[in-house]
Amino acid sequence: MSVQFDYDYFLSKCRTFCSYQDRSLGEVKAKLQSWHIRDNVSEKIIKTLKKEDLLNEERFCRSFARGKFRINKWGKNRIMFELTKKGIPELMVQIGLDEIDDKEYSKTITKLIKAKYKELKRKKSSNPKGKIARYMLAKGFESDVVWKEINRFYK
């Protein structure tokens, strides 16, 4: 296989990979490595994808944060952890987290706590406050915000 053939073929595959959904730089690099692409060809492909705006870390962070919050009901800590795990720089992580509306975030916390409370009430569970707190912390919500809302809810 010639270098030009490698480049054209794998650039086409990467375009498809990136157009399906927003991807991080790390995901694209991992995909190229899984195809055993030479470093010089990989760098050229990445440069082209960025130039064509198919690879955009800021857009990736924004859509990742929005999606994980709205669909999976993840808190900011979990989103931050997952983005950091993907090798996203701290500044980009903050840009992604800025996509989450504070009012919507608060409403989601309240809604999740109420739903968990109803579930535990049906099961006649002991220590519901602690169980609700563990559930919310596992979803990545901040401890102080969770406890404030739990205490407000239980008054």
Image (cartoon, rainbow, N blue to C red):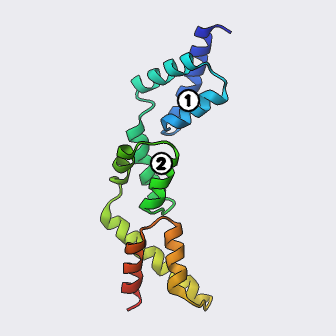
Does residue 4 appear to the left or right of 55 in the view shown? right
Q: How many marks?
A: 2
Q: Are the residues tagged 1 and 2 within 8 Å (C-beta)? A: no
At label 1, counting other C-alpha atoms closer than 10 Å, the crowd grade (few under 14, some 14-19, many 20 or more) is: few
Which disc is residue 16 wearing? 1
| Residue 48 percent across, percent down from the top left | 45, 20
What amino acid does circle 2 point to? Thr
N-term mark: 1 or 2:
1
What amino acid does circle 1 point to? Thr
Of residues 42 and 7, the one drawn nearer to the viewer in this rendering: 42
Does residue 39 appear to the left or right of 51 in the view shown? right
Dividing the image into 4 quarters, which one contains the C terminus? bottom left
Instruction: List the residue tagged with mark 2.
Output: 84
Circle 2: element type? helix
User: Residue 1 sits in which quadrant?
Assistant: top right
| Residue 22 percent across, percent down from the top left | 48, 39
| Residue 146 percent across, percent down from the top left | 42, 75
* Residue 137, placed above or below residue 60: below
